[in-house]
Image (cartoon, grey):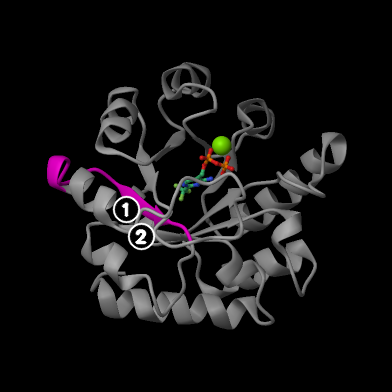
Amino acid sequence: MNIKEALRIYFIMGSNNCGHHEPLDVLKQAIDGGITMFQFREKGSGALIGEAKKQFARDCFRLCKQANVPFIVNDDVDLAIEIGADGVHVGQDDLDAGIVRQKLGQDKIIGVSSHTLQESKAAIEAGADYIGMGPVYATTTKLDTNPVAGTTAIQETREHFPQFPIVAIGGLQADNFTPAIEAGADGISIISAIASVPNPKEATEKLVSTMKEVINDA
Ligand SMILES: Nc1nc(C(F)(F)F)ncc1COP(=O)(O)OP(=O)(O)O
Ligand SMILES: [Mg+2]
């Protein structure tokens, strides 16, 4: 799989991000709308835990598998291993990417959050397959986020690593993500612009069509 193409429209969702529809319906609509990768991120207030979280993960994974959409688990490496997910995303305060690689093996996808060139270097040396950089704009989705970073860190990492897969994250919408791509990101991560809107399928289609205008092969 081409990881840069998988990062184009990278949808991240948990049950507590869904405003207007049942979570599985939101994911179905996002898949129908053309998302290229999915991250299962069940955390924060009201998040499912234990068996309910596992079952929700399996249900999301089934939808992604049917559509050949790569399924990534946020933070929870053991859950990813248990259900056979395609990969894991970890942040600076989660399990070290090198240890995640040892646990998952070479054929799984490992994403790492980065806010600086230094963190990007460490993630790449630890064997990450992509890095998530932001928050580009203010976000209400993640409460313990770093300060708004704009696209400077993306640009800096891209200058040092011209080919390494980077996805932008943080407050991204169809009408504001272009600067992140122009700064060097290969794709965008979206939570509320798909999960919290009345028509997730239409919102996804708009993101896909806008991305096609910005990146020719998208
Ligand atoms: N979940 C994420 N996904 C991405 C992605 F690359 F996919 F865009 N980038 C960054 C994050 C944030 O990861 P983290 O800092 O661990 O916080 P949380 O666990 O609350 O998400
Ligand atoms: Mg995390």
Label disc, if present, on residue 4 of the rendered structure: 1
Callout 2 crowding tier (Cα within 10 Å): few <14, some 14–19, many ≥20: many
Q: Amino acid at mark 2?
A: Gly
Residue bounds of the magenta highlight: 159-170
- Residue at image position (70%, 60%) is 17
Q: Quadrant of residue 185?
A: bottom left
Tell me, yes or no, whether the two marked residues, 1 and 2, touch with CB atoms within 8 Å: yes
Residue 162: image location, x then y, percent = 15, 46
Q: Label 1 amino acid?
A: Lys
105 is higher (above) or lower (below) than 116? above
According to the picture, the residue beneath numbered tag 2 turns out to be: 187
Q: Position of residue 160 (x, y in %)?
A: 14, 40
Q: Is residue 202 left or right of residue 25?
A: left
Q: Mark 2 falls on what kind of element?
A: strand
Select label 1 or label 2 by which is in front. 2
Name the image quarter holding residue 180. bottom left
Nearer the observer, 7 or 122: 122
What whole-number distance in Å separates the C-alpha atoms at marks 1 and 2?
A: 7 Å
**Magenta run includes residue 30:** no
Q: Which mark is residue 60?
A: none
Query: Looking at the image, which is closer to me, 134 or 52?
Result: 134
Residue 214 in percent (x, y) is at 27, 75
CB at mark 2 closer than 8 A to ligand 1?
no
Task: Say which label, 1 or 2, has the lower sequence index.
Answer: 1
| Towards the viewer: 67 or 90 | 90
Residue 154 to residue 210: above or below:
above
Residue at (30% x, 39% y) in the render? 116
For the C terminus, give its image quadrant: bottom left
Residue at the image point whose x is 25% and y is 53% from the top: 152
